[in-house]
Amino acid sequence: MKARIRSLQGVSFEAESGSGHRVIIDGAPEHGGENRGVRPMELLLMGLGGCTAFDVVLILRRGRHVVSRCEVDVDAERADTEPKVFTRIRLQYRVHGTGLTEKAVRRAIDLSAKKYCSATIMLAKTAVIEHAFEIIADE
């Protein structure tokens, strides 16, 4: 896996993934940023949310569950001193589908957290990670 980061101006950067996708990363205005893109630590949280959402949907679908949509809200707290690592992260899942059970969704989230989601497992080295979910039935 590879990525390339190149400066644009000030503390604004373009990041390109090995698969050719790009995202703008920028610092906060008080640190010289121009608010042109996500902050680096926000990008970590976005990666975490995407990683676990991918796992949960894939695990449920492999179990022949009907999932139409999955949303994950990620809320984090950071240490007060440098390095300002994440110390607590809350993941709130909203899984939409037909015939989903609490047992199946809980199992998918647990498998993601403990076995499949590399981002969760790495961030759990510094942060307490909490998971909550709700199931929204499609009509």
Image (cartoon, rainbow, N blue to C red):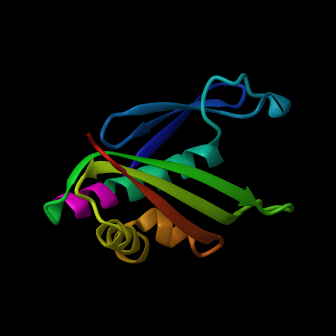
Q: Is residue 128 left or right of residue 94?
A: right
- Residue toward you, 6 or 57: 57
Taking 91 as reference, is 129 above or below it? Answer: below
At a point 46% along the width and 55% down the height, the residue shown is 93
- Look at the image and tell me in which quarter the N terminus lies: bottom left
Q: Magenta span has 81?
A: no
Decide which of 86, 95 is in the foreground and name it. 95
123 on left or right of 138: right
At x 69% / y 24%, what residue is drawn?
35
In the rendered structure, the answer to whether residue 97 lies left or right of residue 70 reads left
Foreground: 51 or 92?
Answer: 92
Q: Residue furthest front?
A: 139
Looking at the picture, tell me which residue is in the foreground, 59 or 21: 59
Can residue 123 be seen here? The reply is no
| Coordinates of residue 135 in the picture (x, y in percent) | 38, 55
Q: Which residues are magenta?
A: 55-61
Q: Position of residue 116 (x, y in %)?
A: 34, 70
Residue depicted at x 79% and y 63%? 79
Query: Which residue is at 52% across, 56% downward?
Result: 92
Q: With respect to residue 22, does 70 lie above or below?
A: below
State whether the magenta stretch is mostly helix, strand or loop.
Answer: helix
Would you say residue 60 sits in the magenta stretch?
yes
Taking the image as drawn, is residue 97 in sight?
A: yes
Q: How far from the left and from the top, in percent, is residue 114?
A: 41, 77
Percent x, y for residue 8?
Answer: 60, 24
